[in-house]
Amino acid sequence: MTAENEGRTRADALMAAITDEPLTDAARADAAFMAEHRSAAADVALLREQLGIIGHALAEPTAPPAPEPEPAPAPVRVRQPSRARRRVFAVAYGGLAVAAAASVLTGLGWLLTQGEGARSDAGAAADEQASEASGGGNAFGSPDYLACSRLVAEGRATSVERLPGTTSLRVTLYMTRYYKPDKGERELTFVVDESLVPGLRVGDPVLLGIPQGARRPDFWAVGEQDIAPERAWITASLAEAGKLTC
């Protein structure tokens, strides 16, 4: 087959896939044409699926982002897990929608140029967008955070005592699970501002993290509802964290 005939076969197969028009008996008997038609039909189906995803994403109402809370006066860096994680998911959702749009545009470029490899490039762009949107880096529970932490563990509050004349609490925890290191003392005590653990009571489950070189936790999660998603992220990150150096 000459280059001119090959180009014409590709163009005809692509147009047939786009318009979804019935194929003639002569076209069905042409092995080269049918191979090009199957490839083009698969790409058109993929683009239609991605356009549907974008359409649903654009149709859903998006709430404006909540204003950032004023930083607590305590000398530690702590975020409230449930609200913070919802913000991460919102950013991730938006980032994935952008990535899907980029993938569609790349696919359309392939249809116009009949080039090869556009879909793999779009996939790499989507992975990069999703990684940036998911709150990676040193976010609590990520492989980087675990690699650079000296303690990540769960416990249960056995004593919550307010220090006289202050807003600080002396919290004693009976440790129930260690992630890093994999074992440690049965009981730990910390002094923390009550604004960082609002409503903490004896019996409440607690998850905390302490970076290397620090004496106090920079992360607190109180209650199973807030701990559960953090625990899942930690468990998924432990294997990769073991391969990293801080």
Image: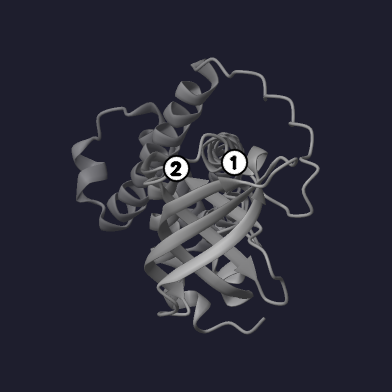
Q: Residues within 10 Å of mark 2 (few under 14, many from 20)?
A: some
Of residues 123 and 73, the one drawn nearer to the viewer in this rendering: 73
For marks 1 and 2, give the CA distance. Answer: 9 Å
Most foreground residue, 19 or 62: 62
Circle on res. 226: 2
Specify the quadrant that holds the N terminus.
Answer: bottom left
Q: Residue at x 64, y 56 (%)?
A: 191
Which is more toward the observer, 174 or 85?
Answer: 174
Q: Percent x, y for residue 92?
A: 56, 41
Residue visible at 45% across and 42% down in the picture: 226
Which amino acid type is shown beneath numbered disc 2? Answer: Asp
For the residue labelled by badge 1, is the local secondary structure a helix, a strand or a loop?
loop
Q: Quadrant of residue 147?
A: bottom right
The image quadrant that residue 88 belongs to is top right
Q: Residue at x 28, y 50 (%)?
A: 34
Q: Is residue 214 left or right of residue 232?
A: right
Q: Earlier in the sequence, mark 1 or mark 2?
A: 1
Q: Is residue 69 found left or right of 196 in the rendered image?
A: right
Q: Give the amino acid type for the residue marked by disc 1 in the picture.
A: Gln
Tags 1 and 2 touching, CB below 8 Å: yes
- Residue sitting at the far front: 164
User: Across the whole image, how many numbered discs are drawn on residues?
Assistant: 2
SS category of the residue bearing label 2: helix
Q: Is residue 172 visible?
A: yes
Give percent across and percent down for residue 141. Answer: 52, 60
On residue 135, the disc is: none
Q: Which mark is residue 80?
A: 1
On screen, residue 85 versus residue 45, left or right, reads: right
Instruction: Examine the rendered structure and indicate whether residue 55 appears above or below residue 129.
Output: above
